Image (cartoon, grey):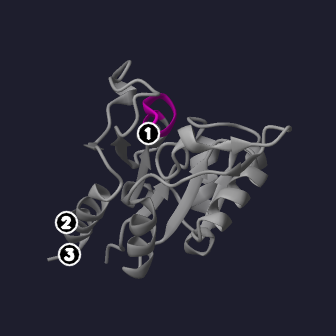
C-alpha cells in the first residue's frame, strides 16, 4: 500500500519573505514576515496528516527565531538546516538528512514533494534524487527560468496555498484503486 506524500519545504521566499528579514550585528535573522498564505499552508498540511520537513540553507538560530516567532515551529517533524549539515542544497545530503530524520529511505523518494523558490538549489536537488519538485515562482529575487534540464520542476505554482490542491491531487493518485 502506498503511503501519503511527504512534504519538504524550503524557507526563504517559500514560507518567509526574505525582503522582510531583520538581522542583528552577527547576521542572524531576528524576525521576518511570512509570505501570504504560508501559515495556513503549513497548518493545513499538518492537520491533514502530512509529514512536514523544513529543508533550508542558513543558520540554525535564524530559523529558530523566525519559526517560533511566527508560531510554526511545532508543525515540522524534521528541520534540516545547512548550518547543521555543513553543506547547502542542491547537495543530496540535505535531502537525505530530511528523509532519514523521518525514517524514509530511497524507496520513499518518489512520494516526497520538495517545494522551493530556487531552481538551482531546491528543484535541482529534488530532481536528482527522484523527488517530486514544486517550484514556487513567488519572488523575482531568483531566476524564474531553468538553466538546464536538471532545473525543470515537475510542477510550478505562484503562491504557497496552491500547494494544498496539488498535494491532495497527488495523494489521490498515489492511493491504490
**Residue 51 colored magenta?**
no
Question: Helix, strand or loop at disc 1?
Answer: loop
Quarter occupied by the N terminus: bottom left
Q: Could you say whether the residue bearing mark 2 is in a helix, strand or loop?
A: helix
The residue singled out by tag 3 in the image is 176
Q: Where is 47 relative to 102, above or below? A: below
Where is residue 65 drawn, in percent x and y?
72, 58
Q: For marks 2 and 1, give the CA distance.
A: 25 Å
- Asked if 136 appears above or below 4 in the picture, the reply is above
- Element class at badge 3: loop
> Picture quarter containing residue 160?
bottom left
- Residue 11 place in picture, x, y as percent: 55, 49
Q: Earlier in the sequence, mark 3 or mark 1?
A: 1
Q: Residues within 10 Å of mark 1 (few under 14, many from 20)?
A: many
Span of residues in magenta = 117-124
- Residue under numbered circle 2: 173
Q: Which residue is farthest top?
A: 147
Residue nearest the viewer, comparing 153 with 61: 61
**Which residue is identified by label 1?**
117
Q: Are marks 3 and 1 in contact (CB under 8 Å)?
A: no
Q: At x 41% / y 81%, what residue is drawn?
A: 47
Check contact, mark 2 vs mark 1: CB within 8 A.
Answer: no
User: What kind of secondary structure does the magenta stretch mostly adopt?
Assistant: helix
Location of the C terminus (image quadrant): bottom left
Would you say 145 lies left or right of 11 here?
left
Could you classify mark 2 by the number of other residues whose Cα lies within 10 Å: few (under 14), some (14-19), or many (20 or more)? few
Work out whether residue 51 or residue 137 is closer to the camera in this orientation and state it: 137
Residue 50's spot in the image, x, y percent? 42, 73
At 46% from the left and 47% from the top, the residue drawn is: 14
Q: In the displayed structure, does residue 23 sit left or right of residue 138?
A: right
Amino acid at each position: 500500500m502506498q503511503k501519503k506524500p511527504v512534504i519538504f519545504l524550503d524557507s526563504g521566499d517559500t514560507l518567509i519573505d526574505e525582503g522582510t528579514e531583520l538581522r542583528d550585528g552577527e547576521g542572524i535573522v531576528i524576525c521576518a514576515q511570512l509570505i501570504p498564505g504560508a501559515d495556513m499552508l503549513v497548518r493545513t498540511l499538518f492537520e491533514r496528516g502530512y509529514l512536514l520537513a523544513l529543508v533550508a540553507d542558513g543558520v540554525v538560530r535564524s530559523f529558530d527565531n523566525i519559526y517560533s516567532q511566527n508560531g510554526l515551529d511545532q508543525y515540522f517533524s524534521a528541520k534540516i538546516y545547512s548550518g547543521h549539515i555543513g553543506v547547502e542544497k542542491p547537495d543530496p545530503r540535505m535531502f537525505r538528512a530530511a528523509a532519514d530524520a523521518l525514517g524514509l529511505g530511497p524507496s520513499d523518494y518518489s512520494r516526497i514533494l520538495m517545494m522551493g523558490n530556487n531552481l538551482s538549489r531546491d528543484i535541482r536537488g529534488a530532481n536528482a534524487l527522484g523527488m517530486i519538485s514544486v517550484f514556487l515562482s513567488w519572488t523575482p529575487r531568483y531566476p524564474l527560468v531553468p538553466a538546464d534540464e536538471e532545473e525543470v520542476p515537475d510542477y510550478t505554482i505562484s503562491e504557497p496555498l496552491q500547494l494544498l490542491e496539488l498535494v491532495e491531487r497527488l495523494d489521490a493518485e498515489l492511493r491504490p484503486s
